């Protein structure tokens, strides 16, 4: 810290040089941070905000990468036994568009207080392990969905029903996983997302379900899903959330010490 001419060399070589708005020009030019008011608490607030932003960035990377990693296995597996495309290109684009919208409010999300206590490092190896463990879980429940659609709803000769069923399940699970990954705690109980993120998630899953019966349904290649399918979907979602939470808890204990 410094505000005079003699402080300029030290401010220049320091990891973080701090000066004040009333300092001489050379001191301010050599500083990384210039305080506009005489209050060091501003630095504390800046550090906390920086950790919060970094936490939300990590959330987004984990969500997007693990989701895409799992979807890759699902598409490859479905393509191996289906006599038709597992999902039409326009449906894939619609799914991705909706999912991307559901993540636009992540910057507004809350970060758990215990995550802000100490500085965090950019640990790419931990993120890679997280993707490898969490990503394939979505594929497991995608395959369960494939089995249900194929054997219980006779989709052998009804590709439109298969496409619609997987579109809805994929969108619901991808949106729901946001709330599992965003915290190391139990979602909705021990840690709740910000209201903008909750509302965005609700709007996106509602929009996805509405598209299957909307005037756009025929254009997008959707058909109305049987009522029984929604009961199957509820069970799949409960199983998905439970297993992901258990694997996340184990992962954090093993690799993150939390």
Image: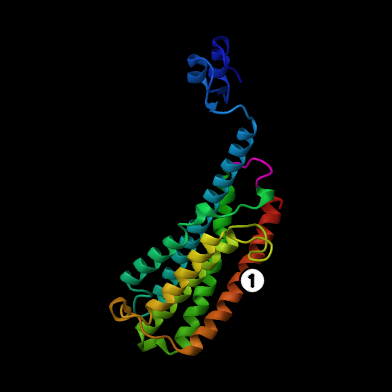
Q: Residues within 10 Å of mark 1 (few under 14, many from 20)?
A: few
Residue nearest the observer in this picture, 221 or 87: 221
Location of residue 141 with respect to 20 vertically, above or below: below
- Viewed as shown, does residue 68 lie left or right of 127? left
Residue 233 image point, x, y percent: 52, 80
| Quarter assignment of residue 214 | bottom left
Q: Quadrant of the N terminus?
A: top right
Q: Residue at x 48, y 64 (%)?
A: 200
Q: Residue at x 60, y 76 (%)?
A: 238
Residue 65 image point, x, y percent: 48, 56
Is residue 111 visible to us here? yes
| Quarter assignment of residue 121 | top right
| Quarter assignment of residue 231 | bottom right
Task: Identify the residue at the far left of this view.
Answer: 219
Location of residue 214 with respect to 257 vertically, above or below: below
Q: Residue at x 54, y 10 (%)?
A: 5
Q: Residue at x 45, y 66 (%)?
A: 71
**Tag 1 secondary structure:** helix
Is 98 in the magenta? no
Residue that badge 1 annotates: 242
- Viewed as shown, does residue 124 lie left or right of 101? right
How many numbered callouts? 1
Magenta extent: 116-121
Residue nearest the observer in this picture, 166 or 36: 36
Location of residue 226 with respect to 176 vertically, above or below: below
Task: Identify the residue at the far top of this view.
Answer: 6
Is residue 152 visible to us here? no
Residue 101 image point, x, y percent: 42, 61
Residue nearest the observer in this picture, 126 or 168: 168
Examine the residues drawn in magenta and state their main secondary structure.
Answer: loop
Residue 82 image point, x, y percent: 39, 79
């Amino acid at each position: 810290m410094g505000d005079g001419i003699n402080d300029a060399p030290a401010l220049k070589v320091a990891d973080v040089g701090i000066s004040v708005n009333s300092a001489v020009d050379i001191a301010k030019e050599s500083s990384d941070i210039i305080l506009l008011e005489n209050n060091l608490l501003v630095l504390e607030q800046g550090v906390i905000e920086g950790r919060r932003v970094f936490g939300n960035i990590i959330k987004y990377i984990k969500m997007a990468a693990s989701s895409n990693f799992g979807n890759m296995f699902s598409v490859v597996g479905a393509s191996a036994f289906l006599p038709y495309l597992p999902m039409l290109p326009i449906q894939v684009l619609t799914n991705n568009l909706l999912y991307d919208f559901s993540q636009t409010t992540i910057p507004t999300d809350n970060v758990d207080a215990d995550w802000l206590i100490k500085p965090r490092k950019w640990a790419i190896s931990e993120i890679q392990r997280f993707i490898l463990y969490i990503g394939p879980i979505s594929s497991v429940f995608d395959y369960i969905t494939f089995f249900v659609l194929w054997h219980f709803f006779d989709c052998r000769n009804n590709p439109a029903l298969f496409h619609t069923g997987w579109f809805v399940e994929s969108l619901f699970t991808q949106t729901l996983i946001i709330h599992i990954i965003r915290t190391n705690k139990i979602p909705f109980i021990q840690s709740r997302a910000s209201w903008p993120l909750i509302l965005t998630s609700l709007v996106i899953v509602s929009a996805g379900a509405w598209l299957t019966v909307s005037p756009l349904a025929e254009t997008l290649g959707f058909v109305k899903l049987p009522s029984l399918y929604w009961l199957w979907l509820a069970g799949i979602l409960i199983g998905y959330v439970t297993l992901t939470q258990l694997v996340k808890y184990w992962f954090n204990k093993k690799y993150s010490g939390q």
